[in-house]
Every structure is written in structure tokens, then in C-alpha cells.
Image: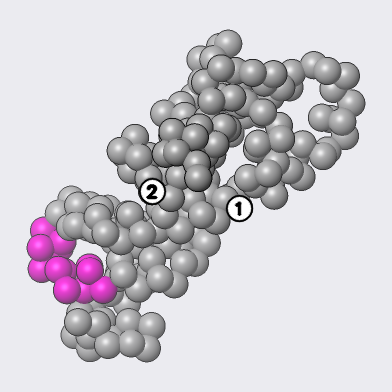
Amino acid sequence: MATRRNRDIFLGGFANLFIEQWQVDLRLKAGDSKKGEAISVHKLVMAATSEVFKKILESDKFKASDGKIETITLFELKQEPLEGLVEFIYDNSSVLSEKEKKHVQSLYIAGDKYEILHLRELCRNELIASLDPSNALNVLELSLIPFDEALNDSAASFIIMNLETICETAEFKAFVRRNPDLSVEIMKASYTRMWNGRYVN
């Protein structure tokens, strides 16, 4: 029977390769990366984790790289969220780290865009669990790109039940300017207690 240490070594294999930077063959840059700043990773790990990365790496540009270490820039991510994304991929974790929770909205978007569905699911759960008057409107907007019914229902229900408090915030005024039609739907729902055909309680 394997000891806990042996199990940890086995499960941490990818993470150890990343820490040791063993035969890395791809660089990832964030949209705000400084010149020369990049994270070195393994094509195989990225492709195994994400169908989107796999398709990118199967493109002619990468097939014809002749051993040159190519760079992919993830313009939608800043440096810290990119670091969190890479750590998640290599750690093979079933929970988000504190660093990943800090950038949960960015990682939710990345999980969706790069089809890392486990990451997207964990981020959705964290976003729902951490709903409060200061972030609920942002989460509701996040649930629309693309539409995520579970996240949308949770955020909208929280807003409807806490509308009196949320209406007093500067975030609400900015939200109304950005989303006038959605704001009307929220106001209606605050009276009917119905959202997407379901009762809000």
C-alpha cells in the first residue's frame, strides 16, 4: 500500500516538473507583462488540460517552430491571475488556493475561454459562496459572458433580496448606467420575487 508521501509525490508530479522547470518548451505572457517577463510551461501539460490550448499548439506556427520556445500572450489576464492559472493547472487541485480565490473573477473568465471546465466550476462555486453587496453586481455581469444560469440565478437572487442595501452603493449607480434594461428587470423582480421563472427567497 502506498504511503501518503508516495501518493503526494505521485499527485504532485506535474507541479514538481514546473518547479524544477524540467524541459519546459512554451512561455506564457500576461497582457500587462513587462518586457522579458514570462512563465515557462510544458506544451503537453497545457494541451492535456485545455482543448483550446491544444488547438493553438497544433497550429502551423507551433508545428514549424523547429525547437524554438514560442510565446503565447493571454491578453485578458494580468500577471498575478496568469500565475494563478498556471499554478491551478499544475497543482491538479480540487480546491482553489487563497491566491486563486483572490483572482476568482479573472480565473472564471479564463476557465471559460480556455475550456478548463473544472476551474470554471470551482470559480463559480467560490463566486456564489462569496456573494456580498459589494460584488454581487459584478458577478451578475460576469454571469452574462457567456450566460451561466447557476451563477446568474444566484447573483440575481442575492441582489433582489438585498436591493435596499445595494441601491445605496456607488457600484449600483454605475451598474444602472451600463445595464439600464437589466436594472429594470431587477427592480421588477424585487416586487414580484420572480427571476427566470423561479421564486426568489
Q: Which secondary structure class fits the magenta region best?
A: helix
Q: Which of marks 1 and 2 is in front?
A: 2
Q: What element carries label 2?
A: loop
Across and down, in percent, residue 23 comes to 69, 18
Q: Gap between marks 1 and 2, in whole Å? A: 18 Å
Residue 115 got which mark?
Answer: 1
Across and down, in percent, residue 50 comes to 65, 47
Q: Is mark 1 on a helix, strand or loop?
A: loop
- Disc 1, disc 2: CB below 8 Å? no
Q: Give the range drawn in magenta.
A: 157-168
Q: Which of marks 1 and 2 is nearer the N terminus?
A: 2
* Above-or-below relation of 149 to 36: below
Amino acid type, residue under disc 1 in the picture: Glu
Along the viewing direction, whichever of 131 and 117 lies nearer the viewer = 117
**Mark 1 packing: few (<14 Cα in 10 Å), some, or many (20+)?**
some
Asked if residue 103 can be seen in this view, the reply is no
* Above-or-below relation of 170 to 34: below
Which residue is identified by label 2?
95
Q: Magenta includes 162?
A: yes
Q: Magenta includes 103?
A: no
